[in-house]
Image (tube, rainbow, N blue to C red):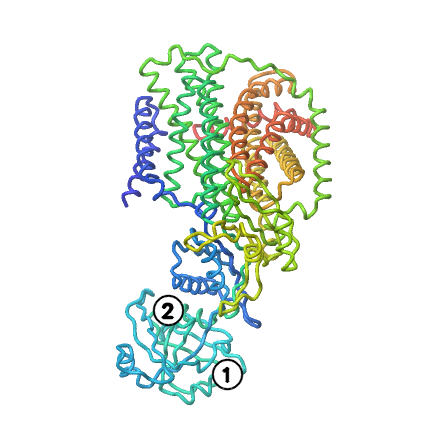
Amino acid sequence: MIIFFCALLILMAFFWYFATDNPLTKTWLGTLITVALVAFCLFGAVPPSEKLKKGIDLAGGSSFVLEIRPPAGKELSNTAITRAKEVIRDRLNALGTADLQIVERSDNQLVVQMPGIEPGERDKIRQTLEKAAQLNFHLVHPQNDQLAQAVADGDEYIAGYELKMMKNLDKNGEVESESPLLITRYPDLSGTYVKSANGGFVPGQGAMVFLAFTNEGTEKFFNLTRDNVGERLAIVVDGEVISAPSLRTAIAGGSAQIDGMASEKEARDLASNLENPLEEPMEIVDERSVSPTLGADSVRQGIYAGLAGLALTLVFVALYYRLPGLIAIFGLAVNIIILFGVMGMFQFAFTMPGIAGIVLTIGMAVDANVLIYERLKEERAAGKSIGAAIDAAYEKAFSAIFDANLTTLITAGLLYFMATDAVRGFAITLIVGILASLFASLVVTRVCFRWLMTANLLEKLSIGSKIRIPQFDFMGKRKVALFVSITAIVICFAEFAYEGEDALGIDFKGGDEIEFKLPAGKDVTVDQVQASAAKLGIAVQPQHQDDAGGSGTFITIRGPEGTAISSFDDEGNIVQKGIVDQLREDIPALGEKTAEGGYAITESVQSVGPSMGKALLTESALALGIGLLAIMIFISVRYEFSFAVGALFALVHDMIIAAGIAVLLNIEMSVIQVGAFLTIAGYSINDTIVVFDRVRETLALKKGNVRDIVNVALNATLSRTLLTSGTTMATLLTLSIFGGPAMRGFSMTILIGMIIGTYSSVFVAAPVTVWWSNMRGKSLRRQVLDTEAAKAAALAAPQQ
């Protein structure tokens, strides 16, 4: 409640801030909002070890995607996945699994995440997850009321019966009490004979369950009820008594009803149990396991990458912009505090892609400040006073900042709702970071400028470097650029055709991937690994990669799906030995154990089934397609259609060439790469919108040849493009160097896309926009002027 009311007060202050025109009121409100938010977020993030939640790739642990496979002749009910989740939770809680997280991924899939567990625990949990659920019917002892408590107290023993505790629920479905039940030790009827079960509320009769049996089950159920009229029949799932209704009469015809339930919810839950969605074992279609040791290494590498990227950005901003640069650094600090505070308060997990999102957020945050400061330089050069220049700079930069960040939010939002958990961590961080960046650049820095003006510290303000960037004829080189772009696209398509499925990672093809982190001084050769795997009849191609921090070497081994981990029967005996166990048996370095009995070198495992790979490929393609469509619609609504055509052409151009270069560099296409491509799309549109915003403004103000005016606009944004792209590329470079194998391909793909996107925003998007407008036979300037006139008329209409 305290958090809610504090957030409400801050929100009300925000509305007041944007509603008032009084500069002094704005200054004080902005200051109070900033102080309140920083204090609020520090409370949510400090101490980080307790408040900030780490995902499996940072904390270590295992994640499974389980798929329900209904028995032959049965269909999954609407409640099947919910019941399956409850059964899985009960099983894992019985094992003492900490920090258990189970979420529904679809109508027939569950995601089970367990941070911090060791590989030995993982194997035991895997066996537990793959077990079928046992549904059976047991008769209750006729003298249960007299004998059950005595058996519970240890005073009696009844041969052929065992004691169970049944939970009694209230109308809200909460456990009200427990009753001891003596039930037959062996089932009197198997639950496999249940054909269907439906629960609900019948007016005038109350909550009840309707049962239907198979043909064979009809006769067996009739015989059981005929011989035991007046007795109770316990319904038992995985050894737990769910219900124990009385048999009032012999039941023929293959259908029955159970009444006397406290609520409709209890009836539906019982029906779900009777349908037994786990009668067949759940199939593990995706498995990802990271050892806690590798998780700690990921945290270390992520921190190094983040600090290096932050240091590069801060030093550059301070040196280039001087006092305004220090203001921007303060805004960045507030941005980071808000980001960590929100992540901590809402318990969003930090993941390895999430760390990439933080570092990229730092790079993006610079963009808004650069846009404002470059405008400020122009306004000061035009002879305006410092106060007027600051107001004009923020006002003119607002539309470009807002539109550019909104498009990135669109792509991040689609990532969150449509992508997998790994990419979702990146999306959450990016969404929070963008919102924090908007607040820091538009509110925090402006409040700082107002306080400095009040103290008369800005009278001799010097903004930015004196370096002059030469003018360039972008439009004059459009044919050369077109030739280069078309050639690059053709080469990329040829590369796609040549590589085919070989360009896809196991996320999309299916298969197993094992990774060991060998400490410095330990060595495992390719020949050793291949010879060991050959004993299982499996051919592998191990890959070595040095750790950027110099602390060891990563060795990656890939094999067919289901070969990495040993499989066991219900008694715990190995049915099929996995590659990991075989390697540990044959290679001394991998078989070494610690004093506690665990392995000194732990492994990370990823296993993706073929069906899951195809589903991920479809989902990823859909996310990309919808992302491009959403961006296209936004630009069409926000700007003229010619600009939307230019932006879409540049966007597709960037995606194709970035993907082609990534494949050429042997960067495999995986689910996380889909996040990289959507990020490239956001950056590409970001750059393009900033350029288009200046092109539209220049076309509306200047007269002359459209090509020349577009050139003027492109050169006016050139310094901003180089500054922003340079700082963001620097942060991506640190990720590529220090981020480790998991992040290296991800960050390298985005870095490639950033370079291509910077090129396309000036050499592709603007020329295509001009060309399209000429094809339509209407001047681009006339389209802009008509749009602005329509807006002015719409604003004036309510006042008339």
Instruction: Please identify the residue farthest to the bottom as the structure is shown.
Output: 227
Q: Which residue is disc 1 drawn over?
A: 218
Residues at marks 1 and 2, CA–CA distance in whole angstroms: 25 Å
| Residue under the image location 38 percent in, 46 percent down | 347
Report helix, strand or loop for mark 1.
helix
Disc 2 marks which amino acid? Answer: Glu
Indicate the quadrant where residue 135 lies: bottom left
Tally of numbered discs: 2
Disc 1 marks which amino acid? Answer: Thr
| Residue under the image location 61 percent in, 24 percent down | 782
Q: Which residue is disc 2 drawn over?
A: 266
Indicate the quadrant where residue 178 lies: bottom left
- Asked whether 591 or 492 is in front, the reply is 591
Q: In this view, does 257 lie above or below 522?
A: below
In this rendering, position of residue 691 left or right of residue 329: right
Q: Position of residue 171 (x, y in %)?
A: 31, 67
